[in-house]
Image (spheres, rainbow, N blue to C red):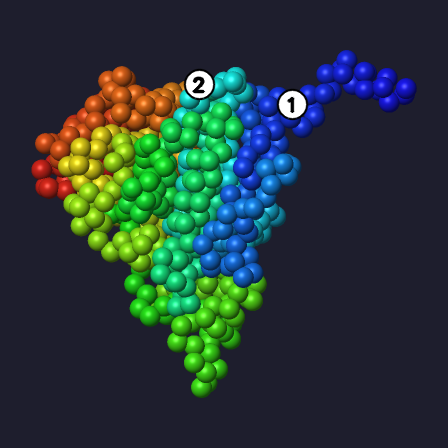
Amino acid sequence: MKLAILSLFALALGLEAQCPGSDNLTVQTSTGTYTGLIDPKYPRTRQFRAIPFAKPPVLSRRWLPPQKLSSPASEHHYATRFPPSCPQFVTAVTSIYNQNLTKGNLIYNGNQNDSSGLVGEATSEDCLYLAVWTPTTALPPPDAGLPVLFFITGGGFWIGGVDIPWQLPPSWVERSQSHIVVTINYRLTIFGFPYARGLADGHQNLGILDQRAALEWIRDNIAAFGGDPGRITVWGQSAGSIAADILAYAFYQDPIAQAFFLQSGSVFSYSPPKDPLYSNFSFVARHFGCDAPCGDNDDDGAAELDCMRQVPFARIVNFIGQYGDRGTTPLLYFNGIPDDHIMFTNYSARSEAGLIARAPVLISTTANEASTMVAWPVQNLTAGPYQPAVTARDIVRMCQILSSTVYRNQMGVPVFRFQYAGTFPNLNYYKWLGAYHASDLPITFGTYELLDGIANTTSFEVEVSQSMQDHILAFATDPYYGLQKMGWEPLVASDPNGGDVIRFGADGNVTQHIDGIEINGACSGVHDYNPFP
């Protein structure tokens, strides 16, 4: 009797809203049932912060391709806390990205600071998780479901993950109420790109395989969150943009994606490190006593690999990271490597052969990408680095992007290009930075207020952010005609240097339509490049 009275009292107070499943916070997928949360700051956005998409790549599964989950759909989990990031090193070398000027652009690092010189405190090998942000007011969703932006974090294949404040999208989803954003973890550095003798062909670029596994999970399950599996746009920034393009080539016959958004990178932006005879992995293995004893035969590298699987991940990460921080040579690189299965030796040849996903592409760059890709000028922060050298690197980046544009145009694939050129007090404490690499991330995600400790967000900054978001969402909603309805035409093969390009945030203008020759013309010597438009 007392229990019944208490239950009625709870109902009268509306406390049933806290139960799992209320407010559509519990979703059943093929690999489990997940309960998310609603942050009071974003009351119209459901957040599912940690959903596994593959088995933990630990112990005997370290350095194996991601393996599908076998959890029953009825098994219940809470997805209310962000997952640990994949193993990565937090460098002590000074750059803009570990200064207060860019606070919030790195992974959550527990009680350590952003330049600890140690393995990230909140990292783990059990890291293959994704997060989903979906609106509440669109429930039930349209018949076909909402468009989905599937975001791949950048960081040079060395750092990155879901739990990065700059890259959390609830404010954007809260505002639009008409799209879903997914962000993912994937294996990095030696764990994601080992180039080890003991691995089979096609198993060296594990981080890319993780991304594909996450994309397949989203295809199979996003409808349960209100999304349309037929309207997934794969979007990446920097190394994540390179990865998105890698996926477009590696899985061109079944890209899953209806479109791609490449933000500051493409396959032509990447120069794979040279590592003859798997020397980097074997060098690390020798440090941990995992080389074959004298007289033993380990030609296939199996013993080396098995031994390395016994070494704690934190020891491996700290050895490689601290080796790099000391500036020791030869350098130890563990990035994507051409294997002609997932990554290819000659992307120009593959492009000419049409071996690329025939899906519309949105490509963006920042106006002064390279200002933060050179050594941080600690001794001369007022004047900054030598700008002509920075501009020369900017031009190289623009010409690499142009290659991606031209090859797709030649196949009749729609390509839209934009340039972010905004400079704002809270992002540009130093004027020489210009619109630097990654400065468009808080504008895209709407997380600019994280930098109000440097200077207050301006109303113009908000306008630029919302306009960028609206254009990106128009593309994700309808990649063929959404932007054309906004008066933005795709580029054409007959005009390789020019065409209709939008510039965001320059010279007091939220948007400007410019001739693409202003960005691409330097590649053929017909127009100077201006990194400060």
Query: For the point 62% across and 21% down, which residue is it?
Result: 23
* Secondary structure found at label 2: loop
Tell me the quadrant of the picture where the N terminus can be found: top right
Nearer-the-camera pick, 299 or 82: 299
Q: Between 456 and 250, which is closer to the camera in this rendering?
A: 250
Picture coordinates of residue 27 (x, y %)?
58, 30
- Look at 52% across and 54% down and name the residue there: 57
Residue 488 locus on image (x, y percent): 24, 22
Residue 422: image location, x then y, percent: 33, 30
Q: Which residue is mark 2?
A: 143
Q: Residue furthest right?
A: 1
In percent of width and height, residue 247 lies at 33, 44
Q: Amino acid at mark 2?
A: Asp
Q: Quadrant of residue 357?
A: top left
Q: Decide if residue 214 is on the left or right side of residue 384.
A: right
Q: Residue at x 45, y 31 (%)?
A: 181
Query: Quick one: 419 or 173, which is closer to the camera?
Result: 173
Q: Could you say whether the residue bearing mark 1 is in a helix, strand or loop?
A: helix
The answer to whether one can see residue 115 in this image is no
CA distance separating discs 1 and 2: 22 Å
Q: Check disc 1: other Cα within 10 Å, few if <14, some if 14-19, many if 20+.
A: few
**13 relative position to 152: left or right:** right
Of the 4 image quadrants, the one containing the C terminus is top left
Number of marks in picture: 2
| Left or right side of 110 for 438 | left
Q: For residue 327, which quarter of the picture? A: bottom left
| Amino acid type, mark 1 | Ser
Indicate whether 222 appears above or below 196: above
Looking at the image, tell me whether mark 1 or mark 2 is earlier in sequence order. 1
Q: Is residue 373 visible?
A: yes
Mark 1 sits on what residue? Answer: 22
